[in-house]
Amino acid sequence: MSHEPRPRTVVGCTLLVIALGAVASACSSDDDPLSARPYDATDQISFNAPDGDGRKADPDKPLQVTAEDGDRITDVTAMDGTGRYLAGELAADGSRWHSTEPLAAGAHYTVRVSTEDDDGAPGRRVLAFDTGKPTTKKRLAVEFGPDAGEYGVGQPVTAKLDQPVKDPAQRAVVERGLKVTSSPSVEGGWHWVDDKELHYRPKDYWPAHATVRVRSNLDGIKISDRLWGGPAKELKLTIGDRVIAVTDAASHSLTVFKNNEEIKQIPVTTGKPGFETRNGVKVVLGKEYFVRMRGTTVGIAEGSSDSYDLPVYYATRVTWSGEYVHAAPWSVGSQGYENVSHGCTGMSTSNAEWFFDNIRPGDVVQVVNSNGNTMETFGNGFGDWNVDWTKWTTGSALTGGKQETNRQTARLSPAAV
């Protein structure tokens, strides 16, 4: 038995379509100010820089953007020709915006301003201007280190300045312009070693296989009345496996961990009484297949019972003053049992060769349970990791605090065995 369509059902559908059309008409973009195309807010926005009349803005003055005729500013983006953004602050009522860091000298800026009127309709204005050249020819040069390449997870980044910067406010300008990014991203910070050098390290070691990029945004930025930032060469580092060697001076053993797994344990000897090996975290500085070590280079008088003059192979340097992990075939009988060296970590030739082949600059060598002093923070290699994170941040001009460093000057020496 067949059924004919119900007329009222068709009518209901028709009414529904009409009703939906009415709703759509009521919500059309013509009646919604937020969906309208942005209006030209040129007449509602003013700023304190020359606008297309050939004059150049003074880089010594902050950029100011002001809303007029009841409009309010909702967002400002200012960027120079190198892609460098200008930080700024927007008033709570949207009436004005001003830059909070120096403009670059000799730069071209594009400023995009978003506004809204009393009805909430969006407006836009794009501004463009150039800044004048620095008023002084004195420029601050920055050299980043180490050289580009692959390093271990403990490698700090260094920034060496060609002129001293002492004033805290000027240091803040410099530090703000030095950028370090890593992939994957990690928390890190700069620490002023002295007036001409900064170190950057993460809160913890770099992640294995990370990529680290370092650049300066100081070019053309005013640091003081007589000093402006100059150009700097960018730096790229790649990080290898997480390799950490732990030397236990009490058990006379060195254990190597790779990506958190123990891969080798080596019997060693460390510094004897009076020549104790430094405790703490050190970073591999380099590797030398052959080094001639003499006691006179560390103040041991020639002819004394402690004097020495020895050829040393497979030497991995961890301090500039002459501490190495190296082959010591003359002390094999003591390795694993007692400490008889003049401060270095000695092992058999075959073990030293293995260590030499499986370690790279930037890898971590940590000494525990020695009676020696703690590794110097600065000046004798990289003892940066012996400073806890809270204290490290006090050495930043941005995160605040009075820095405390124990920088010491150490001469390059192939000294201790």
Image (spheres, grey):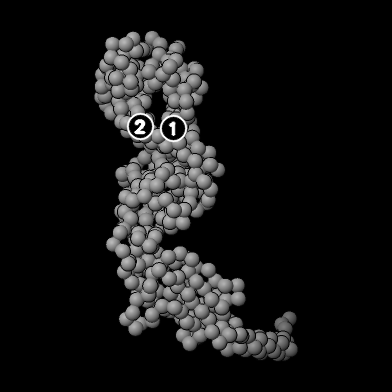
Q: Secondary structure at mark 2?
A: loop
Report the front residue among 341 and 16.
341
Q: Residue at x 34, y 83 (%)?
A: 53
Q: Residue at x 71, y 87 (%)?
A: 12
Determine the secondary structure under disc 1. loop
Question: Is residue 311 shown left or right of residue 14?
Answer: left
Instruction: Give the image quarter of residue 149.
Output: top left
Whether residue 152 is visible here, answered yes or no, is: no
Q: Quadrant of the N terminus?
A: bottom right
Q: Measured from the top left, where is residue 218 in percent x and y?
A: 37, 59
Which of the two residues, 22 or 339, is positioned nearer the viewer here? 339
Q: Could one spot residue 187 in this view of the protein?
A: yes
Q: Quadrant of the C terminus?
A: top left
9 to the left or right of 103? right
Q: Name the mark on residue 376.
A: 1
Q: Amino acid at mark 1?
A: Glu
- Bin the neighbour count of mark 1 within 10 Å (Cα to Cα): few under 14, some 14-19, many 20 and up: many
**Where is residue 306 drawn, in percent x and y?**
34, 13
Q: Which mark is residue 282?
A: none
Residue beneath the point at 43% across and 22% down:
277
List the residue tagged with mark 2: 410
Towards the viewer: 46 or 264: 46
Residue 17 in which image quadrant: bottom right
- What's the amino acid at mark 2? Ala
Where in the figure is residue 215, as x and y percent of width and height?
37, 54
Given contact means CB atoms under 8 Å apart, are the residues at marks 2 and 1 in contact?
yes
Q: Is residue 14 above or below residue 409?
A: below
Residue at image location 39% in from the left, 21% down from the top: 343
**Which is nearer the N-term, disc 2 or disc 1?**
1
Residue 88 x %, y %: 49, 68
